[in-house]
Image: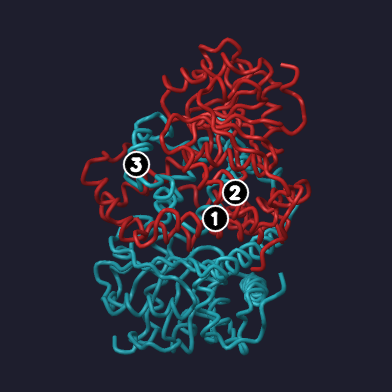
Chain colours: A cyan, B red
């Protein structure tokens, strides 16, 4: 495991599985100057990766951190050809335990013994994914957030067989990628972020299913309300402020009892009936159907970039990861005029 | 109810209850040029309102929408004296049904028959709050979000006796205040936002209680991850993008089954034991105790202002409410250099 703890920029990174997540990992590493090799059996892989990379490049130019020289991008024809001489392999195939285990086996056969192998799974347990591996100590989860080339968070989760060295190598690799890795210290289904997201998703489905609110109304409540808070402080820090001079204890004393009120649908989840899926789909079309997904992506990315720049200006939160990139990136662009 | 539908700026607004929320309502209306009269029996009312108003003024100056002339601020000695000649009364006393009903009775005795009466409750049902009122048709909920002088969302919820005229008057008043009112069409406990927030809060308490994550780690997962997304698009619009060209149906088909996985603590809530409250408090001190609440407020507000300006630059979401203010405000300041 010697060179896994190597603290240098990875020269070559392998991306196995290139949907929205894998393609964005490819873009992030290229923009950091690493050479990237991609494998995905899909027919549209080159188109998807090229489009996602164009979006990422636009955003990094807008942030003023586009590199003087991007890493290269190669499309390989097999897992073996992709993983055979890289120091980091990032697996992003669909969330299917059997499929992931099979792919990890193929990666392991081809990869150098020193390479770190990370899965992008948003909730499967690394202990389960690594159980058939020959060298499970160099496997872990590195769970990123869409769009991966802009959001800095990545949850790093080891399984029972993962070595401490592999965790620290992953933390370091992701820092090099300009990210904010968080070590999830206890291995639980869905880790931390998706536990919170699942809770919101379940409640939102109930609201739509019960006819209380449309997708547009739920989105508006978030983006004109608490979503603005959460872009820069999280749940607890905001509630610490809300408690005023009494602090978070005062807040909990005020707000705590409401946990016992019938304020959410605690006990089960709505069935994803055909009718509910159709309702969500129709409401979403009504809300955003006048824009293509590509247009929505560009709007989202421009907003994210400008929010990141705003936070960088205040030396706060995710803005500090941008400042870190700015310090270490060999740049070709200056920040765009706002 | 004639003059409730009056579409002009309210000359005078009464604020009953001036904690963090009431004080921020006062600040928002003063900054829009309405005269504000405040009543709160607390000993610290003048200090709190003065401090919150200073924060609000700083933020509106930073946004470049501070008014040429603020409305006046008066501290009254009773509810009667506060409500007797205003067109809008905003009640923000603690979340206690009996207390709120008593205060609403006193407001009604003093207020002009034409005045609109709104409660800031974050989840109590307007039908219950209005049941003892003589003129319940002019009562509704206007639930804002902290900090009220910056976050545009306000949930407008009528009870069984609320008139359609009152709903439309409230929508209009809040638009004048520079906000984004959302009519909650179905009267349910906790409305829309706090249903979502409660779901996250409950899950976060479990994560802390189980020792999976600290308050800092949970906050970081949010503000370096999905919180950045939610400042500008909500849940469904982001998932529409995540579904790629297959759209939101494709996303639900991928993500939907996970609802049946054991991904969150569905069935009950953690007891707020002394130990749990102490743990949260200690972790929060560790995370943010080096900053006072006033310092945290200023950091939060500067971040929010700059995020709002970034979104205004992109003519998107909450930025459009700032653009609306900029169009209609009689201004004294230009946007601060960033």
Disc 3 versus disc 2: distance between alpha carbons? 23 Å
The residue to which callout 1 is attached is B301
The residue to which callout 3 is attached is A252
The residue to which callout 2 is attached is B150
Disc 3 versus disc 1: distance between alpha carbons? 22 Å
Point out the image quarter for the C terminus of chain A: bottom right
Which residue is found at the position 53% from the left and 32% from the top?
A: B120
In front of the other: label 3 or label 2?
A: 2
In front of the other: label 3 or label 1?
A: 1
Q: Dot 1, crowdedness within 10 Å: few (<14), some or many (≥20)? A: many
Q: State if disc 2 and disc 3 touch (CB < 8 Å).
A: no
Q: State if disc 1 and disc 2 touch (CB < 8 Å).
A: yes
Q: Dot 2, crowdedness within 10 Å: few (<14), some or many (≥20)? A: many
Given residues B111 and A186, the one toward you in this image is: B111
Q: Which mark is residue B108?
A: none
Q: Do marks 2 and 1 both belong to one polypeptide chain? A: yes
């Amino acid at each position: 495991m010697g060179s896994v703890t190597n603290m240098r920029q990875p020269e070559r990174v392998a991306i196995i599985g290139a949907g929205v997540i894998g393609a964005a990992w490819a873009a992030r590493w290229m923009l950091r100057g690493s050479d990237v090799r991609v494998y995905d059996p899909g027919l549209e892989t080159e188109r998807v990766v090229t489009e996602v990379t164009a979006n990422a490049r636009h955003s990094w130019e807008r942030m003023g951190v586009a590199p003087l020289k991007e890493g290269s991008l190669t499309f390989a024809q097999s897992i073996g050809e992709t993983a055979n001489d890289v120091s980091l392999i990032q697996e992003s195939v669909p969330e299917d335990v059997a499929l992931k285990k099979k792919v990890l086996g193929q990666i392991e056969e081809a990869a150098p013994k020193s390479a770190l192998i990370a899965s992008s799974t948003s909730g499967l347990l690394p202990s389960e994914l690594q159980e058939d591996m020959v060298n499970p100590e160099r496997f872990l989860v590195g769970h990123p957030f869409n769009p991966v080339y802009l959001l800095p968070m990545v949850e790093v989760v080891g399984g029972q067989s993962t070595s401490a060295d592999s965790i620290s190598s992953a933390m370091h690799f992701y820092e090099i990628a300009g990210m904010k890795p968080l070590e999830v210290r206890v291995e639980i289904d869905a880790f931390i972020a998706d536990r919170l997201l699942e809770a919101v998703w379940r409640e939102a489905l109930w609201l739509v299913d019960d006819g209380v609110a449309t997708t547009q109304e739920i989105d508006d409540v978030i983006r004109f309300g608490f979503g603005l808070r959460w872009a820069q402080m999280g749940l607890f820090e905001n509630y610490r402020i809300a408690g005023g001079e009494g602090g978070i204890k005062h807040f909990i004393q005020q707000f705590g009892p409401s946990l016992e009120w019938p304020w959410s649908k605690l006990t089960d989840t709505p069935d994803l009936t055909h009718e509910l899926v159709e309702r969500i789909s129709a409401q979403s079309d009504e809300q955003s159907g006048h824009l293509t997904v590509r247009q929505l992506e560009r709007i989202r990315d421009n907003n994210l970039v400008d929010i990141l720049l705003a936070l960088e200006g205040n030396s706060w939160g995710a803005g500090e990861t941008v400042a870190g990139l700015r310090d270490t990136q060999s740049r070709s662009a200056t920040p765009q005029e706002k």
